[in-house]
Image (spheres, rainbow, N blue to C red):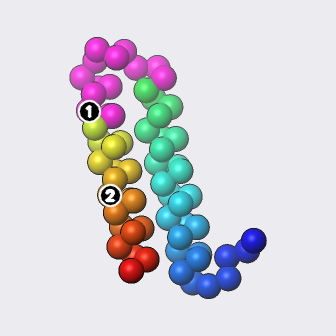
Amino acid sequence: MPASSPADRVNVRAGLIALVLLVIAVVPLAFADVESTFYRVWLLVSVVIALAVMYLRQRRRR
């Protein structure tokens, strides 16, 4: 189903951005040492970014 309204296009774009951020967050974790500081910081930053994107999408809908 094609995105017809501007709000639909914004939601599609936000979803694609969230998907790209998720891939960027997960791919390095496959090669990281679980005990490393890099792993923990990367995971924390990834979760914060994902929560921010979800919050902004919810706020935009209202």
Task: For marks 2 and 1, give the CA distance.
Answer: 16 Å
Answer whether residue 39 is magenta in the image. yes
Which numbered disc, 2 or 1, marks the residue closer to the eye?
Answer: 2
Q: Is 47 situated left or right of 7 in this image?
A: left
Compared with residue 5, is residue 30 higher up or lower down, i.e. above or below?
A: above
Compared with residue 25, is residue 3 higher up or lower down, i.e. above or below?
A: below
User: Which quadrant holds residue 52?
Assistant: bottom left
Disc 2 to disc 1: CB gap under 8 Å: no
Marked residue nearer the N-terminal end (2 or 1): 1
Residue shown at 32% from the left, 25% from the top? 39
Residue shown at 39% from the left, 69% from the top? 58
For the N terminus, which image quadrant? Answer: bottom right
Q: Residues within 10 Å of mark 2 (few under 14, many from 20)?
A: few
Residue shown at 38% from the left, 50% from the top? 50
Looking at the picture, how far across and down is residue 53, in whole percent? 38, 59
Answer whether residue 37 is magenta in the image. yes
Q: Which residues are magenta?
A: 30-43
Q: Which residue is mark 2?
A: 52
Q: Residue furthest right?
A: 1
Mark 2 lies on a secondary structure that is: helix
Pick whichever, 43 or 61, lies toward us. 61
Q: Is 8 situated left or right of 32 in this image?
A: right
Looking at the picture, how far across and down is residue 61, in whole percent? 43, 77
For the C terminus, which image quadrant? Answer: bottom left
Compared with residue 34, is residue 60 higher up or lower down, i.e. above or below?
A: below
Q: Which residue type does callout 1 highlight?
A: Val
Q: Residues within 10 Å of mark 1 (few under 14, many from 20)?
A: few
Q: Which residue type does callout 2 highlight?
A: Ala
Pick whichever, 8 or 16, lies toward us. 8
Residue shown at 28% from the left, 14% from the top? 35
Q: Which residue is mark 1?
A: 41
